[in-house]
Image (cartoon, rainbow, N blue to C red):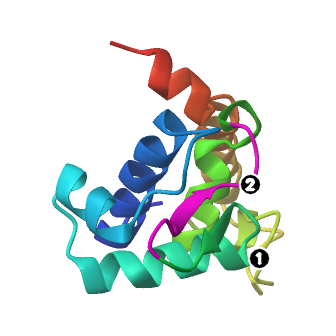
Amino acid sequence: MKVSKKGEYALRAMIVLSLNYNREPLQIKEVSKKEAIPIKFLEQILLDLKKAGLLESKRGAKGGYRLIKHPKDITLAKVIRTIDGPLAPVGCVSQLAHVKCPREKRCKLKSTMLDVRNSISKILEGVTFEDICRKK
């Protein structure tokens, strides 16, 4: 698993939105400025997060984006999967996007790659945006 630049920007934008939870929506330009994310790229990211049910948007002068769910209910894993896809390093050990492999039953790598996937998943599923926002 590698977090793309888009994935990194999504995580950073989610932190800004989490810090703003239960307040007025944030305009894209505010998030862009705070995190130095190009506006056009950020628009795509926020739309993906909205489609995933994490954000809502409001049009108009006081419009923008805000979280639908509490930051304690959104894990880093959810955002990374939304933007970058499965956490598994190889398709044959992915739980959400399993890819059948003809060597699966005799592959010497599978158990190690499964351990890697499980470790990554355990960490990222165990950290919420509330946790991240509480860190100094």
The residue positioned 50% from the left and 73% from the top of the image is: 46
Picture coordinates of residue 14, whole percent (x, y) = 49, 50
Q: Is residue 10 left or right of residue 127?
A: left
Q: Which residue is mark 1?
A: 97
* Quadrant that contains the C terminus: top left
- Marks 1 and 2, the one that precedes in the sequence: 2
For the question of whether residue 51 can be seen, the reply is yes
Alpha-carbon span between mark 1 and mark 2:
26 Å
For mark 2, what is the residue? 68
> Relative to 82, is 99 on the left or the right?
right
Mark 2 packing: few (<14 Cα in 10 Å), some, or many (20+)?
Answer: some
Residue 49, position in %: x, y? Answer: 61, 70
Q: Which one is nearer the viewer's eye here, 17 or 108?
A: 17
Q: Secondary structure at mark 1?
A: loop
| Residue in the picture at 49% in, 47% down | 17
Look at the image and say whether residue 38 sits in the magenta stretch: no
Magenta residues span 61-70
Nearer mark to the viewer, of 1 and 2:
2
Labels 1 and 2 touching (C-beta < 8 A): no
Camera-nearest residue between 3 and 90:
3
Query: Does 67 appear in magenta?
Result: yes
